[in-house]
Amino acid sequence: MEPTEAPSAAPVADPTQTELPLPSDAAAPAPELDTEIDPAQLKAIVEAVIYITDEPLSADQIATALRQPAARIGEVLAELTAEYNRPDRGLTLREVAGGYKMSTKPEHHEAVRAFVKNLKPALKLSLPALETLALIAYKQPITAPEIMEVRGVQGAGVLKTLLDRKLIATAGRKTVLGKPILYKTTKEFLVQFGLKDLSELPSLKEFEELGRLSMTDSDLIAAPPESASETTEPAAAEDTLPVEETTE
């Protein structure tokens, strides 16, 4: 009887060897489409994203960003285009350079141009004026000497500028020696800074930062040096403010 060979044992894996994953030629799965958005809501979203974007948006860009079928976005764009083409709409949605963009209708350009020319210029304040306005806003009512004590400089010219801009107004006199004039902010101040009331004032640091952002770099470079009336308080400036009576 011939001897039989024992079955060979299965190879034992070497725990010191790390198995490498096999290369895969499979492409990354496409993102799942969001089909649960209500048609009315989707139309509103598409309208909003086109409105806030400066460059024309293509249907494919919108479909990818919103995870919607391109055909569905195409239908929404067609509906919006038809709605904006109605004569009672001042804006138009049209295809420009392969994308969609909102703009005013050509037939309204002259009326819009005339309106823009009559708009008030943007509020621009120098840094000394902004600092003074911030102090008045947060410490009101406050007197000129109290403002000078905080800022370290006299600023009758700055106060005159703020009075002329109707951002501040007088609020009587303080019952102390000399009876200095008190200053407070106005309704125009709330309008210019978009505040409902003084309780919505940001922090003092945020307030000053908002003012700085309203001044472009060109304003800062081209602005002439601060006049003496905004950094010092010459005698001539006294004539531009209410005279403060002095009692012995």
Image (tube, rainbow, N blue to C red):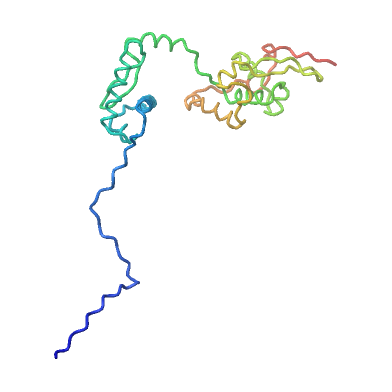
Q: Position of residue 227 (x, y in %)?
A: 60, 20
Left or right placement of residue 165 versus residue 2 in this view: right
Q: Position of residue 244 (x, y in %)?
A: 75, 14
Q: Position of residue 220 (x, y in %)?
A: 51, 26
Residue lying at 73% horizontally and 23% vertically, measured from the top left? 145
Above or below, 183 relative to 22: above
Residue lying at 66% horizontally and 26% vertically, measured from the top left? 138
Q: Quarter of the image holding residue 183?
A: top right
The answer to which of 5 and 77 lies nearer the viewer is 5
Residue at far bottom of view:
1
Give the total of numbered labels.
0
Q: Quarter of the image holding residue 64?
A: top left
The answer to which of 11 and 232 lies nearer the viewer is 11
Residue at far left of view:
1
The answer to which of 186 and 241 lies nearer the viewer is 186
Residue lying at 50% horizontally and 13% vertically, measured from the top left? 120
The answer to which of 229 and 147 lies nearer the viewer is 147
Left or right placement of residue 144 versus residue 166 in this view: right
On-image quarter of the N terminus: bottom left
Left or right placement of residue 168 versus residue 176 in this view: left
Q: Quarter of the image holding residue 60?
A: top left
Residue at far right of view:
248
Residue lying at 32% horizontally and 31% vertically, measured from the top left? 62
Q: Position of residue 85 (x, y in %)?
A: 30, 15
On-image quarter of the C terminus: top right
